[in-house]
Image: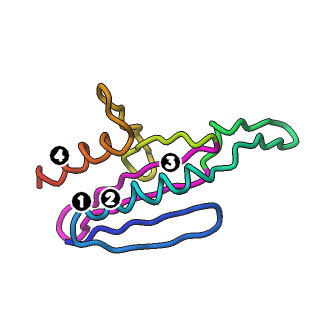
Amino acid sequence: MRWKLTVRVGPKVKRHTFTAIAEALDELEARAREVARTAPDEVVDAKFKRFEPVEQVVARLELAGPERFVPSVRAGVDVRGDGSMEAYRGRVRREVIAARGSENPFTALRRTLMQADQAR
């Protein structure tokens, strides 16, 4: 089984492949934290609307699961302009993964993907 991590920061796209989901999740977290530290906390003023930093996605890190015999699992983390992060599941219709208790976006994502991986 191969897990693919796609890291999109602005116009730059990097792809990585992992054999284990745990390795892929560790790399996703490390890269997301790195991007969040350097996120530009600036308001974007378009002609008709202002976009506050929390409304801007400056980076999207997406994991794609094995696709051979089962439907692909897609999930990831969005890094906002203010450095905040939000875990999601899905590709076209993104569904926010709600954190339980003291979970951060990474532990919520890990919990969701591990459950999906064990269900196979």
- What separation in Å lies between label 4 and label 3 (alpha carbons)? 21 Å
Q: Earlier in the sequence, mark 2 or mark 4?
A: 2
Marker count (numbered):
4
Q: Earlier in the sequence, mark 3 or mark 2?
A: 2
Q: Which residues are magenta?
A: 58-81
What residue would you read off at disc 1?
A: 22
Residue 41 image point, x, y percent: 70, 43
Name the mark nearer the viewer: 2 or 4.
Answer: 2
- What separation in Å lies between label 3 and label 1 (alpha carbons)? 19 Å
For the point 11% across and 50% down, the residue is 119
What residue would you read off at disc 2?
A: 26
- Position of residue 29 relative to residue 86, above or below, is below
Q: Earlier in the sequence, mark 4 or mark 3?
A: 3
Residue 80 image point, x, y percent: 58, 44
Q: Would residue 56 be found to the left or right of residue 85 on screen? A: right
Q: Amino acid at mark 2?
A: Asp
Residue 78, label in figure: 3
Q: Quadrant of the C terminus?
A: bottom left
Q: Is residue 69 magenta?
A: yes
Q: Is residue 110 magenta?
A: no
What residue would you read off at disc 4?
A: 115
* Residue neighbourhood size for the residue with mark 1, other residues' Cα within 10 Å, grouped as few (<14), some (14–19), many (≥20): some
Q: Amino acid at mark 4?
A: Gln
Q: Secondary structure at mark 1?
A: helix
- What separation in Å lies between label 2 and label 1 (alpha carbons)? 6 Å
Q: Amino acid at mark 3?
A: Asp
- What separation in Å lies between label 1 and label 4 (alpha carbons)? 13 Å
For the point 85% across and 37% down, the residue is 48
Q: Are marks 2 and 1 in contact (CB under 8 Å)?
A: yes
